[in-house]
Amino acid sequence: KNQVEQSPQSLIILEGKNCTLQCNYTVSPFSNLRWYKQDTGRGPVSLTIMTFSENTKSNGRYTATLDADTKQSSLHITASQLSDSASYICVVSAEEYGNKLVFGAGTILRVKS
Amino acid sequence: SAVISQKPSRDICQRGTSLTIQCQVDSQVTMMFWYRQQPGQSLTLIATANQGSEATYESGFVIDKFPISRPNLTFSTLTVSNMSPEDSSIYLCSVATGGGSNQPQHFGDGTRLSIL
């Protein structure tokens, strides 16, 4: 079973709309939870990093939330743009694995005009 | 953040050959990592490249198949040896620029490898 599960697997939205991507994890205890954006043909780029004591963090139109009790995180994208089309990857840094990164499979977002 | 350059960006190779991928960072970094991203799947850590000593490999990856060098704090290479079609994947170099578990990890754009 994947230790970091993301939903939905893919999503299509219209430009200007908002959307929320979900991440559930079983890794425990964990050091931090990260969201990355990966454009096609590029490497992942960090959007947010949250420790277990933080429950929200924003980066422009991206807002990540974390509920360490339920082991859930979400990434909310506001007023989507065509350039938001990418794969969004949830990543957990786990103490039990020497703080190595455990990656989810990603949500592929497509923003249409 | 660190600027990471990987070469080559893509290659098509024959079965049984080997390819060395280079990763150059524009500043000294504490940690360098090599990942594999198979089509439609999440990233998997191959190994941590240690400066001046042997790399630390993850379960399922061995030095004979993926020899790694890290001669200094800004450069590392990953060789994919005796390639087979199953090695077709994206190989990514990643670096951590500071100490502590909450530091960001930056990625290169990857090397897209296809084996015929």
Image (cartoon, rainbow, N blue to C red):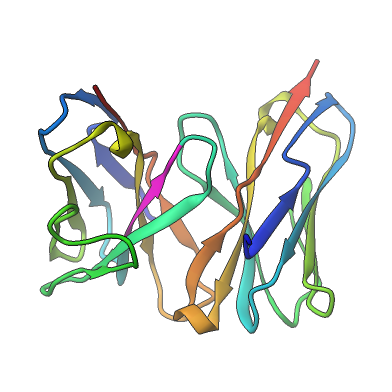
Name the dominant secondary structure of the magenta segment.
strand
**Is the C terminus of chain A in the top left, top right, bottom left or bottom right quadrant?**
top right
Furthest toward the right, the residue is: A17
Residue B111 in the image, given as x and y percentages of width and height: 31, 36
Identify the residue at image location x=55%, y=76%: A94
How many numbered marks have been drawn onto this rendered protein structure?
0
Relative horizontal placement of residue A2, taking residue B92 as reference (left or right)? right
* Residue B37 magenta: yes
Eyeballing the image, is B54 above or below A90? below
Identify the residue at image location x=81%, y=33%: A80
What span is colored magenta in the figure? B33-38
The residue nearer to you, when weighing B23 against B21, is B21
- Kindly indicate the quadrant of the structure image that contains residue B6: top left
Q: Can residue B1 be seen in this view?
A: no
**Is the N terminus of chain A in the top left, top right, bottom left or bottom right quadrant?**
bottom right
* Residue B51 magenta: no
Residue A99 in the image, given as x and y percentages of width and height: 48, 77
The residue nearer to you, when weighing A19 against A95, is A95
The residue nearer to you, when weighing A26 against B106, is A26
Furthest toward the top, the residue is: A113
Relative horizontal placement of residue A46, taking residue A68 as reference (left or right)? left
Residue B94 in the image, given as x and y percentages of width and height: 37, 55
Relative horizontal placement of residue A51, taking residue B30 as reference (left or right)? right
Eyeballing the image, is A37 above or below B113? below
Q: Is residue B75 visible?
A: yes
- Kindly indicate the quadrant of the structure image that contains residue A17: top right
Identify the residue at image location x=54%, y=64%: A102
Identify the residue at image location x=52%, y=83%: A96
